[in-house]
Image (spheres, rainbow, N blue to C red):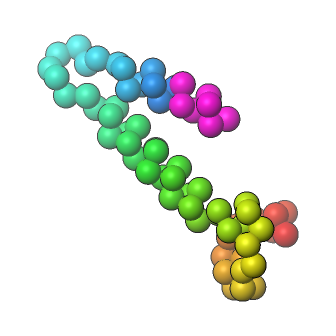
Amino acid sequence: MVLGAGCVLKDVRGVEPACGTVRPYRSVVVAYLVLYAAMFVFFYPVLTGWHLSYDSWRLRMWMRSWI
């Protein structure tokens, strides 16, 4: 899924606007990458099995089916 998103972002980043030098999709690509990195850092303790307090663990369980 990450590789597919990366390929789409690469294609979107390369789109040239018809008139002008402003690239409107560059900010979208950067925002997506920043959000992706932030979510990875947020869930890293759960993914690696670190010991978390119950409140910290519960903060990361957004859906009831994850518990």
Task: Report the side of 46 relative to 31 (left or right).
Answer: right
Location of residue 26 by image quarter: top left
Location of residue 62 by image quarter: bottom right
Magenta segment includes 8: no
* x and y percentages locating residue 35 in the rendered image: 48, 52
Instruction: Answer yes or no: is residue 35 visible.
Output: yes
In the image, farthest residue toward the left:
20
* x and y percentages locating residue 10 in the rendered image: 45, 25
| Quarter occupied by the C terminus | bottom right
Q: Residue at x 40, y 47 (%)?
A: 31
* x and y percentages locating residue 19 in the rendered image: 17, 16
Magenta segment boundaries in residue numbering: 1-7
Q: Residue at x 62, y 31 (%)?
A: 3
30 to 18, vertically: above or below: below
4 to 43, vertically: above or below: above
* x and y percentages locating residue 24 in the rendered image: 28, 32
Instruction: Answer yes or no: is residue 58 visible.
Output: no
